[in-house]
Image (cartoon, coloured by chain):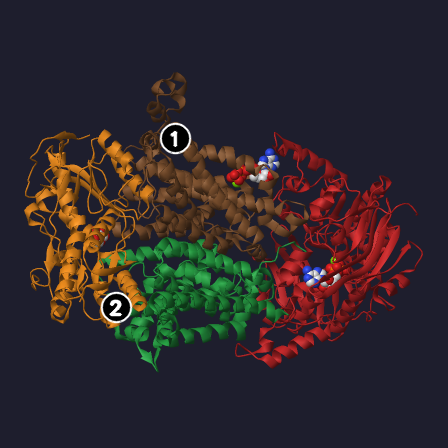
Amino acid sequence: MTSTPIVDLSGVSKSYAGIRALEAVDFAAQRGSVHAILGENGAGKSTLIKIIAGVVSPDAGEMRLAGKPVRFANPSAANAQGVVCMFQELSLIPDLSVADNISISDPPRRFGLIDHRAQLVRAEALLARVRCEDVDPRTMVRDLSLSRRQMVEIAKALGRHPQVLILDEATSALTARDVQTVYDLLGQLKGEGVTTLFISHRMHEVETLCDRLSVFRNGRHIETFAKGERTDGEIVRLMIGRDVTAKYPPKPPQQLRPSVLSVDGLAWETALKGVSLTLGKGEILGIGGLDGQGQKDLLLALFGVLKGVRGRADIGGRGLPGSPVEAKSGHPRVALIPEDRKTEGLMLPLSIADNLVTAAFDRITRGGIIDAARLEAAVQDGIARLQIKVGNPKDPVRTLSGGNQQKVVIAKWLMTDPDIILMNDPTRGIDIGTKQEIFRMMRDLADGGKSILFYSSDYAELIGCADRVLVLYDGQVVRELEGPAITEEAIIGASLNLGTAA
Amino acid sequence: GPEIVAGPGAEPECFAPWSADTTYMQWPAKEGPFKIAIVNGFVGNTWRIQMIKTAKAYAEDPAIKDKIAEFKVVSTGTDAPAQLGAIEDFINQGYDAIVTIAVAPDGFDRVIRLADKNNVVLVPFDNVLDTDAVMQVNEDQLAMGRTWAEFVMKELAAAGVSEGKILEVRGLPGNSVDRDRSIGINEVIAADGGKWEMVSVVGNWDDGTTQKVVADAIAVHGQFAAIVGQGGSNGVIQALKDAGHPWVPVAGESENGFRKAIAQYKDDGLKGISIGQSPGLVAVAMKAAISALEGNPMPQLISVPLPVADYTTLEDGKNFWSDLPDNFFTVNEFPPCGVNISGPAIMAKDESDLN
Amino acid sequence: MLRLVNQNRGFAGAVSLFVVLFVIYNILHPRGFSSAVLVQNANESVAIAFVAMAQTVPVLMRGLDLSVGAVMTLSACVASYLLTGSGLDISLGILATLAVGTAFGLLNGLIVVYGRLQPIIATLATGAVAIGLALLLRPLPGGDVDGDLGWAMTNTVWDFADTYGLADGGEAWWLAPFANIPVPLILLIGVALLVWLPFKRTVTGRTIYAIGSAEGAAYVSGLPINRAKLAAFTLAGFFSACAGLYLALQTSTGNADTVQAGAYTLNSIAAVVLGGTALAGGIGGAIASIVGALILRVISFYFRILDIEPLLQPLIEGLVLLIAVSIGAWRTFSVKNRLELFR
Amino acid sequence: MRVAREDKPLMIALGFTLVILAVGTGYTLTTNGTAPLLQPTYLLQQLQIGSFLGICAAGLMVVILTGHIDLSIPATLTGAAMIGTAIGGPTAIPAALAFGLCVGLLNGAGVAILRVPSMIFTLGMDTVLRGVTVAQTGGFAPQDQATPLMLALAKDRFLGIPLALYVWAGVSIVVAFLLARTSFGRAVYAIGTRERAAYLSGIRTRPVIVGAFVASSVCAALAGALLAGYSAKAYQGMGNAYLLPAIAAVVLGGTNVLGGSGRYVGTLIGVILIVLLNSVLSIMQMPEALRQIIYGTVIIVMLLIYGRGDRETGQ
Ligand SMILES: Nc1ncnc2c1ncn2[C@@H]1O[C@H](COP(=O)(O)OP(=O)(O)OP(=O)(O)O)[C@@H](O)[C@H]1O
Ligand SMILES: Nc1ncnc2c1ncn2[C@@H]1O[C@H](COP(=O)(O)OP(=O)(O)OP(=O)(O)O)[C@@H](O)[C@H]1O
Ligand SMILES: O[C@@H]1[C@@H](O)[C@H](O)OC[C@H]1O
Ligand SMILES: [Mg+2]
Ligand SMILES: [Mg+2]
């Protein structure tokens, strides 16, 4: 471990409009290692890798690549030197084909012009490497599911022959099978001497994949150590500065709950093929299964977004809501924490305060006119309730870290005082500490008589958190698990629809 | 195409040659009835509407009705390619004559060549072309401008005014009549001994626009010694009234309202002259087209006299009507040609139906 | 094939609409399906088609260029001075005209890129500047464009050859298959084929699509954002100059017609949308906008065939346009996931 | 911090306004030895002329904030004036406004329900309405004289101040209040920022968008009624001069053309700036060519000084 580090940063600082994102960071990664970067939301991880990848330039400090000082003016300069990054927010172009995207900036050419045929061949080869033979390189990226997009993104990165490959929460939406593919790939790359910098909030991924770990907190590099040198508990303490004893709050005993929502034979287009379920008062009902089995459509249907849904539904004596407006103002009130906070949950340029109240204008107005005092109170209340770390509530919500943005989304919906909360993978990209707070809050809400329908792509969360779990496969509930029967094997087995035997 | 022939032409009292040098054209005679199209450019003002109505009424006139097999009117707006396209399309459709108000004085070379190739008679009128390759019908625009300016200079001199600002209200930019009138006006004023400062605004030949720009000009410049305006003269009067601007000599077109105002305020200083382009020119042009198709020799440039009236010659019920609305052009008929559709008849009658 | 249609649904719809309208027009026309009619139609459509192409490029990267009509007018005014004299003079004049429009487009690009202004407002302002310059050049319409050139460029290939005594005055056997094709159509298609299609197949061209689709993603993917933006506006300037050049040839004059400039700019947006290019960027193409422009034009052709009250013509034209753009709305009603309405 | 950033365009626009006044006054002082630009009567009169633009811009701003645009303002203004004067009598102004309301509802429906891009739907609407005005003027020489109320509103004064300015002030107060203090206003900003998120927040996006278009059309119609009063009549093309300056005023006032941000005061200052710029150019008797060039250059220079529009880098 004494050879020249491939990436070496010293004294790097960066602030955004007064907010310190990184402070005097020294960081090094060795050639051929898989190096995890850990830290809670807002710790500065993304900022660090953006600096390495040439997306933002540091205010101070310097960077060496294989010993040579470098300063990237833009991402293409970094690419040219073998630094390739998969960003937390995808960098694919939705309206171009998969093949176009994979060879986006340096396509094969004939007579100086892009050679579509060669591009296709190249895309097929790279997709095969990430075991995505099912993806047709001519489809538009916008028609792919999030998990497929992440795989395409990985294929695109591979195609750039990285020396240093950076994955910033690139696996947050991946399902078990794809995660395995990524493991294998990283293993291969390591063999070829490629360095991987890996950011994830999924501790088990970090444990299986990485050789070294660096922990960041509040923009500072706290410590770097080899895998196994520290226990999980110690790592978490380094990250969030305190102990996390139990990640999940205790579940109440199994009990009979009056139903607040039940659907029977819910069908929609080709995505839902007769889903039946009952959600009890005060219950956290988990939804599992491989990505894209209709879970998201189910939540959208219950929230009134989909048209032409068939089947019976009973929500407090009424059918499905016809629109989100009806959903949130009906009886019982329904809320949806949507899939993508950046485009569906938040209005990034608007202030934190404005975002907090967008679902609950009636709480801040009298006769349609905004009451300044009520507005102020509602905003303070929302911030306090989820302990959102904000400087000034008038700052654009864009300036918050991912985790805090997610809290804003949740707080916004709690402000409507919903009876039924639909959650679409609410902890995607959320750090351990915050996750714990969210789970705590979910349980408190449930104990307070709210009901939660909770989809997660992370089985561990379902196991730790849900009172009952339904596993969806191909638009149908294939398995219902309850109490001690909620195990990883059971969920994975049902997800792959491996017969009905337990 | 037409042959250049020696005069005189047919019906000289109607188709008067522009000048002694005017050449004559003759097309091979065709069997009627004919297919005739009108391709108007701009549609935005009263004059053009009155023109279109006159054309349609004239096509029904017993004197020519039987000579017309098909009659179509299109308005293309001010876009040159669209106007050229429409003319060419009518040529392709086998129309015999196309009467048009050109959106620009140049640029018609191609359609002229095509018309000649197909023996189609193309007759620009009102806004005519800068060419002698086609037969055209118009009043003398340069003379109109000069007469306006001379009148105003004479009235100012009579009132003992020899310096000040003169407001010129122009028509739709880029058209030939706007250009020629303006040249005439400015030529005369420049030659005058007085110390005149010209201020010019664009009124698009439209009352409303004119009223607005004149009001704005008064707001900015204070007072004018006189106003010389193309179509939209009602607007000039209205703007003067509204601003409480003293009555001064005004030259304008033949709108009924303008003439009414001159008659009413001539003693308060509104020494007015009203020379209108007649929307009835369209009828003269149509008649000329038919005559040409019948094989008659025609002057290349047909002159229709300027219908001059000023505060000394206005007469209620004869060349204006105090009981009729403001909004039509009084001069419409041209008896020497048998064009007897009067302004009130074509424009005011619907109004009275309404009320 | 099905995929291509599906991925270019707007374009496919536009082509079908145009074909239907055009065929019916020709059936109704006494001399339908003749080269004379085609020549006339082509002449009338070339300028707006070029302006529509110009508008497409910025729109693809989610910016509007409100100066295209003005740049066309400016170019036409320049051309009206230069398209005369010897063959060499004229050739240089053509190049100079194209250069002026292209340079103006580049200026737009520089302002948008380095001034970091929204294209729509930056070009609203530069459009005024272009019109001002055009008015300085041509306070009155005028000019002296070479007559033969005008004739040759606005007719069939045969006439072209005939005018310049090429290919045995147009009678050469090898010219026969093309003899009846309108020169304006060849110009239009030639520019599209030789400039637009190759450009689309460069990284810069692709970057324009990428910017319209997801600018942030394009940037982090290492695409040349600034170069693409400059290229987009420059290309828009070039196509606008082509329109101006043609306009000058067609009318043998330059006319600093503000109203016409404004109308062409607005119609170019309509053409772009009718062709199926998304105003939100990322989807569509210049070829599609040519079709859009043709649809706009063919609507007005009908007024010369059918007997329609002249004073109602503008109203009907508007209604047809409104209906045409609303036809796409059936998709809105068949959308099953309302989120798809908000992309 | 944030306040400063939002106020920057306002300060710059104000600064430019002063520069324009100074340049104009310098000119008149040297040529005529007078300073009409600094006389309250002259300024009031310019503002009176500016009120038509101001009212159009107020409505347009609401539409722009939702991320849309209303290109039908010219024909809506004209149409409303024509309908109003044709109907005449005491119902003239209500009729004009009702016409605006209908246009707004149609535009709103086309954009919010059919989801045709506003850029194109309102352009189509403008063409249709233009056609209506042509047919209307030509079909049966309609009555087009402004009613006494229209004349009074456009020209009379109260306490020395033109009534038109009171109307503009009233519209301003309503629009500013709507935007800043009502849930409608919040919804407008939310939709303009990200419609998808607004929809998923349970905001009634369709009625709000329709509302924005109604605001724009009704304002245009009101401006039409006033302008008819000012011009004493309604006429074709009377609205043509109000679209591009209105867009420019809104944007110069610091509103994002793509929606989501901007304050009403900015629009107000933007209008004043454009009105003064125009009148100074008239006073200087600038030929049309130079006028256009100066006009365009001023807009560009101002926006460059704002230095807004930070480069988008994703993340
Ligand atoms: N564009 C920006 N403008 C202002 N502040 C920013 C911006 N980007 C990041 N920040 C701030 O910088 C700090 C570090 O953010 P960064 O995105 O690096 O965190 P992170 O460790 O990647 O968090 P997460 O796990 O939530 O992705 C945070 O406080 C964040 O609010
Ligand atoms: N042979 C091919 N195989 C797969 N995809 C293709 C192929 N050819 C084109 N495409 C994709 O189709 C899209 C557009 O097609 P193309 O480049 O042929 O332009 P076009 O749509 O025909 O032309 P224009 O956009 O100018 O109207 C691009 O995204 C391109 O990647
Ligand atoms: O000749 C002009 C005509 O073309 C226009 O339409 O109205 C006014 C007339 O002066
Ligand atoms: Mg991050
Ligand atoms: Mg295409």
Task: Please name whichever residue, B149 or A456, is drawn nearer the observer in this view of the structure.
Answer: B149
Give residue D75's quadrant in the image. bottom left
Marks 2 and 1 sit apart, C-alpha to C-alpha, by 56 Å
Q: Position of D92 compared to B277: left or right?
A: right
Task: Please name whichever residue, D195 or B197, is drawn nearer the observer in this view of the structure.
Answer: B197
* Chain A on-screen colour: red
Q: Is residue A467 above or below residue A207?
A: below
Colour-to-chain, brown: C
* In the image, farthest residue toward the right: A229
Using the image, name the chain to which the residue with label 2 belongs. B
Q: Could you say whether the residue bearing mark 2 is in a helix, strand or loop?
A: loop
Dot 2 and dot 1 within a common chain: no
* Chain D on-screen colour: green
Using the image, name the chain to which the residue with label 1 belongs. C
Q: In the image, ligand 1 is in what quadrant?
A: bottom right
Q: Position of residue A489 (x, y in %)?
A: 84, 54
Label 2 sits on residue: B223
Label 1 sits on residue: C183
Q: Position of residue B346 (x, y in %)?
A: 15, 56
